[in-house]
Image (cartoon, grey):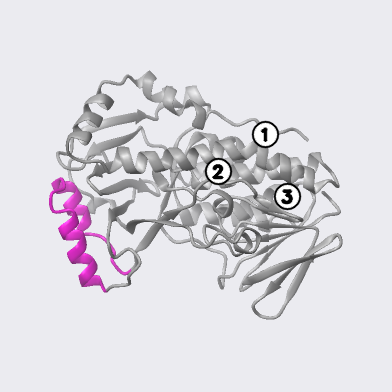
């Protein structure tokens, strides 16, 4: 890899992780980010134990843990009566089983850790205000064109530019992602503003008929992260704060009082339409390859979008190193290694979203009764496929 020039489009978690992994192998890496500066939206993110072996390889485990909270439990509560439905106990037994913790971390902190790790590598270059408009191949080189008229040549192009990836559109051309008719509002408040009587050290999902809320603490339990998600006919429309407030109040009118208290705190200046993509093959073309959401965008049900992108990055770097000059062989093996795992994340996330988190009436009562009868071991067994570390191909 020492003689390879690699262009990465997208400066999010997946792009930065790929830059570190490839930079550590000696490649000359250029990360192109369209925003004026490298950064992230300031809310929380959950990361499963499967990501920590990747952090070990990237050399950022200690930095990540220093900024993280390790919850004792990940709960699901019924949004109407506030009673527990199921719980993943994420304490000592969980960590012993999977070898690593489950964490929550401020997205800005995670992004800064990855950015600092990139900047510590002299062969990794971070380019801001670099909006890519397309790419082309000529012989043994691939070139990207930028909106400001510049171009950049390399040996390999990695599209890590998210669910609306420009690289994907040129490569596959499958249009907009699949909108599911839900939106999200996010906010962070001081921890002392959190509703009384809920476990403030844990992750909680309140699942209800067509809506849910996720809440957990961040940064030494000083702040409280809230995400409110609900089905809306106006998911593609822009509105004002008052119209959003009226819609939330109507949607959550039957919800538990703690949820209504959180709704009253929400920052309504911005909403995010929720979308994913169906699993599909064909993540590469010529010298260009996709990873992360650009290849396999998923709903948030399993909290694995970032984890899958980071796993992708480490696996791709190892396979490019193993296969030397044969990038086509590396790309083909990368897809074989990753397609079933990421597809399962996509499909199970859709199932959980529709059938589990947002069901109502008798279906919700059946769900609650069935889940409450499950043992801790039953819960863990359902997660073993996801949380046990993946086997990374050796160079």
| First in sequence: mark 1 vs mark 3 | 3
Q: Is 82 rendered above or below residue 14?
A: above
Mark drawn on residue 60: none
Residue 267 placed where, x, y %?
A: 29, 64
| First in sequence: mark 2 vs mark 3 | 3
Mark drawn on residue 392: 1
Q: Is residue 357 magenta?
A: no
Mark 2 and mark 3: Cα distance apart in space: 17 Å
Mark 1 and mark 3: Cα distance apart in space: 14 Å
Pointer 3: residues within 10 angstroms few (<14), some, or many (20+)? many
| The one of 30 and 297 positioned closer to us in this rendering | 297
Q: Residue at x 31, y 39 (%)?
A: 355
Span shown in magenta? 240-269
Visible residue check, residue 204: no
For residue 335, side relative to residue 342 (left or right): right
For residue 9, side relative to residue 238 (left or right): right
Q: Is residue 267 magenta?
A: yes
Q: Specify the quadrant of the image occupied by residue 336.
A: top right
For residue 322, side relative to residue 362 (left or right): right
Q: Which residue is mark 3?
A: 22
Callout 1 secondary element: loop
Visible residue check, residue 324: yes
Callout 2 secondary element: helix
| First in sequence: mark 2 vs mark 1 | 2
Q: Specify the quadrant of the image occupied by residue 256.
A: top left
Q: Which residue is mark 2?
A: 308
């Amino acid at each position: 890899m020492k003689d390879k020039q690699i262009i990465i489009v997208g400066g999010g978690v997946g792009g930065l992780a790929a830059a570190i992994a490839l930079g550590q192998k000696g490649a000359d890496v250029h990360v192109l980010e369209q925003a004026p500066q490298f950064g992230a939206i300031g809310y929380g993110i959950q990361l499963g134990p499967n990501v920590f072996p990747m952090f070990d390889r990237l050399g950022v485990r200690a930095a990540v843990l220093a900024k993280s909270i390790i919850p004792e439990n990940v709960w699901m509560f019924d949004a109407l009566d506030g009673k527990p439905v199921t719980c993943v106990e994420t304490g000592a037994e969980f960590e012993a089983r999977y070898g690593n913790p489950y964490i929550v971390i401020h997205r800005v902190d995670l992004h800064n850790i990855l950015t600092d790790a990139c900047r510590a590598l002299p062969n990794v270059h971070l380019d801001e205000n670099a909006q890519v408009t397309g790419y082309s191949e000529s012989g043994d080189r691939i070139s990207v064109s930028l909106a400001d008229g510049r171009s950049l040549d390399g040996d390999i192009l990695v599209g890590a530019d998210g669910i609306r990836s420009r690289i994907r559109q040129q490569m596959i051309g499958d249009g907009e992602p699949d909108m599911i008719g839900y939106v999200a509002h996010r906010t962070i408040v001081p921890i002392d503003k959190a509703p009384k009587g809920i476990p403030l050290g844990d992750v909680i999902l309140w699942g209800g008929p067509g809506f849910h809320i996720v809440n957990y603490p961040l940064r030494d339990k000083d702040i409280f992260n809230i995400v409110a998600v609900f089905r809306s006919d106006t998911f593609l429309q822009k509105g004002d704060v008052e119209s959003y407030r009226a819609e939330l109040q109507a949607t959550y009118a039957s919800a538990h009082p703690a949820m209504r208290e959180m709704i009253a705190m929400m920052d309504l200046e911005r909403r995010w339409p929720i979308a994913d993509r169906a699993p599909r093959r064909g993540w590469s073309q010529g010298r260009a390859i996709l990873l992360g959401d650009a290849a396999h965008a998923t709903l948030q049900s399993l909290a694995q979008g970032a984890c899958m992108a980071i796993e992708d990055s480490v696996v791709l770097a190892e396979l490019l190193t193993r296969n030397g000059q044969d990038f086509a062989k590396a790309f083909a093996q990368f897809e074989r290694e990753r397609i079933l795992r990421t597809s399962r994340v996509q499909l199970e996330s859709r199932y959980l979203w529709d059938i589990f988190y947002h069901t109502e009436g008798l279906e919700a009562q059946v769900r609650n009764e069935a889940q409450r009868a499950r043992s801790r071991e039953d819960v863990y067994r359902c997660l073993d496929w996801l949380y046990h570390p993946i086997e990374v191909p050796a160079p």
